[in-house]
């Protein structure tokens, strides 16, 4: 791997995990080279940079790879620490932020996947689970502007990419995020007013097209 | 030394995630009150402090609860600055976190399958675990501990494997063969368990094996109530 100076991001356009890294880099005003990976034909660079998981996103900074999206976001926060801090300075608040980012990580993507992969009773169960997850997150947000309070922070970065999947979740499982968690929808709109988020997140309809393509590919009707 | 009333740890004696937190507290010389939880009959305090996951460990510092053992480790490191367990450099910190997540998510999953399942699924899990152990073995090349000359965050995160992997093997009748195949990892396990803070803070082996044996008999896919 070349020890080139600069920042490169190996990514895939629709990945919410990659979007976390893109949003964090944008918040910090870091210039970087974006490389779109074909996940069905992964590049040598990706396989060498992330030999254990072979997954995107991978951030490569001055030739050194960093893997796992939340680890990448913390790395970005610690390396470009002069601007737009994503984690608060108080250790207890930081622990809270890490807990909730970890909660999003463990719950949202997997449950979301079940909503478009499954049918019938299993899908119903997944829908109930997703509603519960959204309501727990809504309770945590409360009346704050962002999960980070007044500051757009670590938990906001961790969760906001999934908002472009809400339309897909709603359409596949027949429910409304706005009905079950209106504050989350309002929060998502506020996040979209930020250039970093607005320029990064794909149109929810494009995400849905991608979900439909995946369903065809996996033979899910 | 910190006043003991200020720091409380809710735990369960057999839990590796709880010991991980205790090792960190002891490395830092932090005094704490330990509260043993009966996970089949959780206390109202535990449920109040960890309403989302309802699990141990929970660290309560000045009445503020912190949950998830790796989150607790970072909190401990940021609050009590003596004997730092995480490196200062952001790239080294990213690597430390990477390995911690790797063992907590991937190795734990394969170990769990090797422990609970039988037949082909068990064999497949053992194979996968060995691939993971190989990666850990390579990471240890030229190093005494994952964190360098002294134990640190990564060692504390991987630490459950030094003791509980052997326990799981004995309780569930399988062998990952690290002593033969992965010399660096095998050597690290011995060195880690010989460290005073670790040696003096492990559950009794026989009792732990019995506990996990009984746990396996309880059912094939019960999730352990600990993180």
Image (tube, coloured by chain):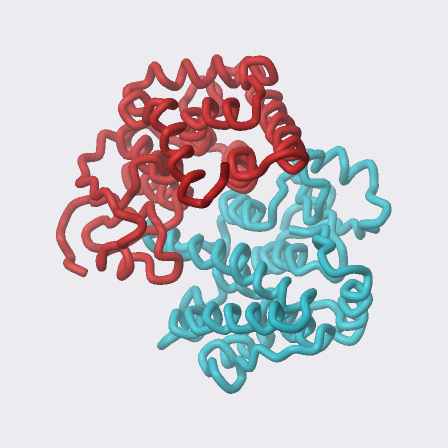
Chain colours: A red, B cyan
Depth check: give the residue in front, A175 or B92: A175
Quarter occupied by residue B165: bottom right
For image coordinates 74% across by 47% down, the residue present is: B10
Residue B24: x and y, percent?
58, 56
For image coordinates 74% across by 42% down, the residue present is: B5
On screen, A68 above or below B142? Answer: above
Depth check: give the residue in front, A193 or A84: A193
Depth check: give the residue in front, A110 or B82: A110
Using residue B60 as the reference point, say whether residue A53 is left or right of it.
left
Quarter occupied by residue B118: bottom right
Residue A170: x and y, percent?
52, 23
Using residue B36 as the reference point, say whether residue A208 is left or right of it.
left
On screen, B24 above or below A118? Answer: below
On screen, A86 above or below A37? Answer: above
Residue B35: x and y, percent?
78, 49
Inspect this view and state whether residue A156 appears. Answer: yes
Residue A34: x and y, percent?
20, 40
Q: Residue furthest bottom?
A: B180
Using residue B103 as the reference point, say whether residue A194 is left or right of it.
left
For image coordinates 82% across by 44% down, the residue present is: B42
For image coordinates 32% across by 26% down, the residue present is: A202
Using residue B158 as the reference point, say whether residue A42 is left or right of it.
left
Position of the N terminus of chain A by quadrant: bottom left
Inspect this view and state whether residue A96 appears. Answer: no
């Amino acid at each position: 791997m070349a020890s080139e100076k600069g920042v490169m991001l190996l990514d895939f356009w629709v990945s919410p995990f990659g979007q976390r890294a893109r949003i964090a880099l944008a918040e910090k005003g870091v210039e970087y080279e974006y490389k779109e990976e074909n996940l069905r034909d992964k590049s040598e660079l990706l396989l060498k940079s992330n030999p254990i998981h072979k997954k995107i996103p991978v951030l490569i900074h001055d030739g050194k790879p960093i893997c796992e999206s939340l680890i990448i976001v913390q790395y970005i926060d610690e390396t470009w620490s002069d601007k737009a801090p994503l984690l608060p300075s108080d250790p207890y608040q930081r622990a809270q932020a890490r807990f909730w980012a970890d909660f999003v990580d463990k719950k949202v993507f997997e449950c979301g996947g079940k909503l478009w992969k499954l049918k019938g009773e299993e899908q119903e169960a997944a829908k109930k689970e997703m509603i519960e997850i959204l309501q727990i997150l809504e309770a945590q947000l409360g009346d704050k502007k962002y999960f980070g309070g007044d500051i757009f922070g670590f938990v906001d970065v961790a969760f906001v990419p999934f908002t472009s999947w809400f339309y897909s979740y709603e359409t596949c499982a027949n429910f409304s995020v706005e009905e079950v968690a209106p504050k989350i929808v309002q929060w998502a709109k506020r996040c979209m007013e930020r250039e970093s988020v607005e320029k990064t997140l794909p149109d929810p309809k494009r995400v849905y097209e991608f979900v439909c393509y995946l369903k065809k590919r996996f033979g899910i009707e | 030394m910190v006043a003991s009333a200020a720091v409380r740890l809710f735990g369960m004696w057999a839990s590796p995630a709880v010991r991980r937190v205790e090792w960190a507290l002891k490395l830092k010389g932090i005094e704490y009150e330990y509260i043993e939880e009966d996970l089949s009959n959780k206390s109202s305090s535990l449920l109040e402090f960890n309403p989302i996951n309802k699990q141990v460990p929970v660290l309560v510092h000045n009445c503020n609860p912190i949950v998830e053992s790796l989150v607790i480790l970072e909190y401990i490191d940021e609050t009590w600055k003596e004997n730092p367990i995480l490196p200062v450099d952001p790239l080294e910190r990213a690597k430390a976190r990477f390995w911690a997540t790797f063992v907590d998510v991937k190795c734990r999953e394969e170990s769990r399958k090797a422990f609970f399942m039988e037949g082909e699924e068990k064999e497949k899990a053992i194979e996968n675990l060995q691939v993971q152990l190989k990666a850990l073995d390579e990471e240890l090349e030229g190093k005494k501990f994952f964190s360098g000359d002294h134990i640190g965050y990564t060692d504390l995160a991987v630490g459950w494997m030094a003791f509980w992997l052997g326990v799981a093997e004995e309780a569930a009748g399988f062998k990952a063969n690290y002593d033969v195949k992965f010399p660096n990892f095998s050597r690290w396990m011995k060195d880690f368990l010989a460290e005073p803070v670790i040696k003096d803070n492990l559950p009794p082996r026989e009792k732990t094996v019995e506990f996990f044996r009984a746990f396996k008999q309880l059912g094939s896919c019960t999730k352990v109530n600990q993180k």
